[in-house]
Image (cartoon, helix red, strand yellow):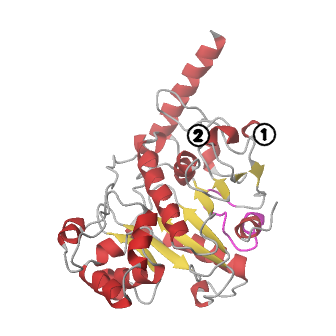
Amino acid sequence: MRRFRRTLVAAALASTVVASTAGWASGTAQTPVTGPPPGTAQWRADRSLGRELPDPASASPVEIAAFFAALTPGQRHALADRHPLVVGNLDGAPVALRYEANARALGAEADGRRILAYDPRGRGQLAEVYGDLDHARHIAVIVPGSDIDAATFNRTSAMARALYGATNGATRAAANEAANGPTAVVAWAGYTTPLGVGIDAATGDLAEAGAERLTRFTRGLAATGAPGATKPALFCHSYGSVVCGLAAHEAGASDIVAFGSPGMRADSVADLGTDARVWAAKAPDDWISKVPNVEFAGLGHGNDPTTPEFGARRVPADDTDGHTGYFAPGTSSLRAFAAIARGETR
């Protein structure tokens, strides 16, 4: 009975926090963007190669990679020209071809950037690469939390630039200029995130949809054959750690790093079902500490990954400031993240 009362109290606290904690915004319900990329109907109708093209809705990234490997360069470029939104978002397609297709879809907005995915539906989704994805020995993927979309993507790209610079020794914030470092970093805003911290942020619906997209994305990286793509490291911020927790058993990651996490929809590392090394960090004054770590009737995300009973490896964050300071220059958290991304920590 006492345990039951504690559960009810925790659930009530979670509801209260979602509704009224200082500094949190009320959320607006979001419908996740799912399914094949825009332009798929025209792609399916294309018979320019004298046969059907692989169905983006059902073909695996391995099948997509095999399809493009069998084409001539001219055929690949022609498909990217005719179907930029499909090719640019097709996991398993050659990386350089995706850059080309997305540059065509975005026009001047691409401005020489390495855009690995661009989906204009909903609030817009983006993935941008820092470094040489095809040849990097290690690949890190940053998975953001609430309020990130095409309009606010700079928050995630700033994290990626900081990690790329710390990992490869770049001295400028525009670390993408150092394109041949041993570690590439992907800023992946490839799912529909919650707006504010309302019911969407307190439940797992958007995270479940995001986990499917993240899993397909990492499998697409592996299908390209890049040296570091078979076991990427996932750096998962805030609600993004819920996404990573749900994707952990299929994402094929070498490391999963949860920071500023409300929980990973798991009681412990063992419950994640992964052989990846799992890490957790939380700054002393991160407001995420005010979130009750419960999961009750679909509300809340479970245990705090930084607690000893969860079983994650701790990332030092004593000198990290607030909920968004984990990538600040000179912090212990950024130094530790860089070592993890380089595969140096055992």
Three-letter amino acid code of the residue under disc 2: Val
Say which residue label 2 marks. Answer: 291
Q: Quadrant of the C terminus?
A: bottom right
Residue at 46% from the left image edge and 59% from the top image edge: 216
Question: Is residue 151 visible to us here?
Answer: no
Q: Position of residue 70 (x, y in %)?
A: 40, 79
Instruction: Measuring from the top left, give residue 57's x and y in whole percent.
Output: 31, 58
The residue positioned 39% from the left and 77% from the top of the image is: 68
At a point 58% along the width and 21% down the height, the residue shown is 7
Label 2: state its secondary structure: loop
Q: How far separated are the C-alphas under marks 1 and 2? A: 18 Å
Residue bearing mark 1 = 308
Crowd around label 1: few <14 · some 14–19 · many ≥20 (10 Å) = few
Foreground residue, 52 or 222?
Answer: 52
In which quarter of the view is residue 338 placed? bottom right
Q: Which segment did they paint magenta?
A: 321-335
- For residue 253, side relative to residue 72 (left or right): right
Judge whether residue 328 is colored magenta: yes
Q: Is residue 258 above or below residue 233?
A: above
Quadrant for residue 158, please give it. Answer: bottom right
Q: Name the side, left or right, on which 10 lies relative to 151.
A: right
Q: Residue at x 27, y 70 (%)?
A: 53
